[in-house]
Amino acid sequence: MGVAELAASRLDWAASQLAECRLCPRQCRANRAAGELGFCGAGAEARGFMDYVHYGEEAELVPSHSVFLTGCNLRCIFCHTAIERRTLPSEPLTAERLLAMVERGRREGARNVSFHGGEPTVNAPALLRLFAEAGDGLPPIVWNTNLYCTAETLEAIAVIPTFYLVDLKFGNGACAEAVAGAADYWEAVRARLKEAAAREPGKLIVRHLVLPGHLDCCTRPALEWLARELPSARLSLKTDYLVMPDARRDARLGRFLADAEVRQAAALARDFGIPLARQLDSRAMGALVRGQPSEGVALDAELIISPTGAVFLHHPTREVTSIALALRQSQPLPKELEPSGGKKQKGKSER
Ligand code: SF4
């Protein structure tokens, strides 16, 4: 059965959720079909506010056509897309518009289409309808998710994405509550991760973004749990934390990661023996970004230099990646920031 047929088989379920939304642990029961909005703010339609061919994802996924949707059921103060979601105009996605976007991404070399947020799962009913209407012309679908949803929701969407890229953000409920407003996050996401891994073990990469000051409370328990409960799950350890405006006043999240924290996180992953998802090194990245001309992207890609001189890419399109590679070649990185130290590939990590 193709994606369109699978999605079509879920449309009754999707309609029931829009009439009384219970997609995630918030259990708002909003009648989204009638215009009510729950905690996530997602309506009956999926609305896109940004898309581009992204060079900052894991090696097996890039170039990836990232499509960003409004609506999120978490309130992470370090969110990389919160400002764009608040300020950029959004448009309802139609099947026609999605197919046109996908075609543009294909021409730019994208290997897949990746849905980000916000959070794609809160848009699952609308996306299922779009997939059913779009037919089987879509490339492989990547679901870039916080997986903060119910077991029923995961069951309903499970067969649709070709790949799950799951953010495991915290390692306990107190930090999840303080930073993202979701005290039950740790319980819910661990349960969903186990279900996803049992169903599709080869289709899952777990991302963990190391947060400043959260090594012992979050990184250590998250990696320890992964190693114990999902020993074959591949980990993408992200150390490209950016200080977003909402985090600037936070006592711990208002600074960049210290080099020692980067080294300690890498050592934890190594000591726990967690298999790592492959990241592109600078040579592979150089070959990739020089592969073909870009059609141009109307997007404010950013190149951010931390107080210690580390360079971060926000929205790493081909153009901004080329600039970073040129900078990299003109001035070698300090040893601790070399790819083996986990800091070469800078990309968006949180949605
Ligand atoms: S998906 Fe949105 S409306 Fe539905 S239960 Fe979750 S937060 Fe509420």
Image (cartoon, grey):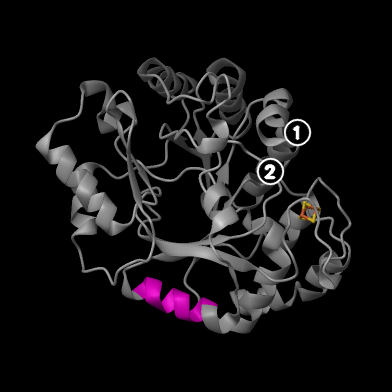
Quadrant of the image for the N terminus? bottom right
Q: Residues within 10 Å of mark 1 (few under 14, many from 20)?
A: few
Instruction: Give percent across and percent down for residue 300.
Output: 38, 56
How many numbered dots are placed on residues in this image? 2
Residue in the image at 14% along x and 31% along y: 332
Q: Which residue is mark 2?
A: 74
**Foreground: 210 or 194?**
210
Q: Amino acid at mark 1?
A: Glu
Q: In front of the other: label 2 or label 1?
A: 2
- Asked if one can make out residue 289 in the rendered structure from this viewpoint, the answer is yes
Q: Residues within 10 Å of mark 2 (few under 14, many from 20)?
A: many
Q: Which residues are magenta?
A: 98-106
Q: CA distance from mark 2 to mark 1?
A: 15 Å
Q: Amino acid at mark 2?
A: Leu
Check residue 187 in the rendering and tell me which mark sits there, or answer none: 1
Q: Mark 2 or mark 1: name the one nearer the start of the chain.
A: 2
Residue in the image at 65% along x and 63% along y: 159
- Helix, strand or loop status at disc 1: helix
Is the magenta region chiefly helix, strand or loop? helix
Instruction: Give percent across and percent down for residue 314.
Output: 39, 46
**Foreground: 290 or 33?**
33
Q: Quadrant of ligand 1?
A: bottom right
**Foreground: 216 or 192?**
216
Residue 14 shown left or right of residue 57 in the figure: right
Above/below status of 50 relative to 336: below
Instruction: Give percent across and percent down for residue 157.
Output: 69, 62
Above/below status of 101 relative to 290: below
Check residue 226 in the rendering and tell me which mark sits there, or answer none: none
Above/below status of 265 relative to 6: above
Decide: marks 2, 1 in contact (CB < 8 A)? no
Residue in the image at 62% along x and 26% along y: 225
Is residue 152 part of the magenta span, yes or no? Answer: no
